[in-house]
């Protein structure tokens, strides 16, 4: 048989291992969700390039300039039916020659408290972040 002290030592060791492993696991999952959002941003960027090829502008019209709405499936990450929504994608700052696509963390979603904040991608391919925690930069979050 086991004594109570031996059992408590085993429980303490398991607790220590869990306290080390859990943060690593959660960061690994967050990194995977950010990768999904980056993929979605690139797909949305391809949609915008096709829009420009067809309309010779990134706007919906010259009389009432606005950014085109992303089609269903390109407006979220992960795409519809692939789990709970972590990011919502929107096009902003659309002009005749530029745009910015932002992957905004969904309120109450699995990435709501992600330290990398929201991911952005411009028409020139420049990657960026908004609302990131200090110490989290583009190089770290766009891996």
Image (cartoon, rainbow, N blue to C red):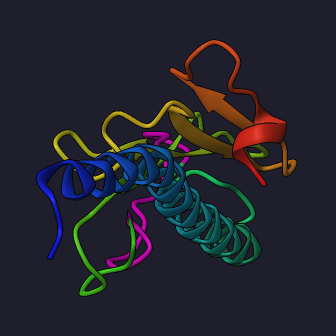
Residue 105: quadrant of the picture:
top left
Q: Nearer the viewer, residue 115 or 8?
A: 8
Look at 50% across and 32% down and name the residue there: 117
Work out which quarter of the rendered image holds the C terminus and state it: bottom right
Look at 55% across and 18% down and name the residue there: 133
Q: Nearer the viewer, residue 92 or 113?
A: 113
- Residue 66 seen in the current view: yes
Region of the chain picked out in magenta, as a range: 62-76
Work out which quarter of the rendered image holds the N terminus and state it: bottom left
Q: Nearer the viewer, residue 120 or 13?
A: 13
Residue at the outermost top position: 134
Look at 56% across and 23% down and name the residue there: 132
- In the image, residue 115 sits, relative to residue 10, either above or below, namely above
Look at 22% across and 68% down and name the residue there: 84
- In the image, residue 28 sits, relative to residue 125, either above or below, namely below
**Rendered location of residue 104, percent (x, y):** 41, 42
Left or right: 138, with 113 as reference point: right
**Rendered location of residue 69, percent (x, y):** 39, 60
Left or right: 126, with 100 as reference point: right
- In the image, residue 123 sits, relative to residue 118, either above or below, namely below
Q: How many marks?
A: 0
Q: Is residue 10 magenta?
A: no
Residue at the outermost bottom position: 81
Left or right: 81, with 44 as reference point: left
- Residue 127 seen in the current view: no
**Rendered location of residue 103, percent (x, y):** 49, 48
Q: Is residue 65 magenta?
A: yes
**Rendered location of residue 35, percent (x, y):** 62, 65
Q: Main secondary structure of the magenta part?
A: loop
């Amino acid at each position: 048989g086991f004594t109570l002290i031996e059992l408590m030592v085993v429980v303490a060791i398991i607790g220590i291992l869990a306290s080390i492993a859990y943060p690593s696991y959660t960061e690994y999952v967050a990194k995977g969700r950010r990768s999904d959002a980056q993929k979605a941003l690139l797909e949305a960027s391809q949609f915008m390039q096709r829009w420009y090829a067809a309309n010779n502008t990134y706007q919906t019209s010259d009389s009432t300039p606005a950014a085109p709405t992303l089609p269903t499936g390109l407006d979220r990450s992960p795409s519809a039916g692939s789990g709970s929504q972590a990011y919502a994608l929107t096009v902003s700052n659309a002009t005749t020659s530029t745009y910015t696509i932002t992957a905004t963390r969904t309120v109450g979603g699995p990435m709501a408290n992600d330290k990398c904040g929201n991911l952005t991608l411009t028409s020139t391919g420049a990657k960026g972040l908004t609302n990131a925690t200090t110490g989290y930069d583009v190089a770290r979050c766009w891996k």
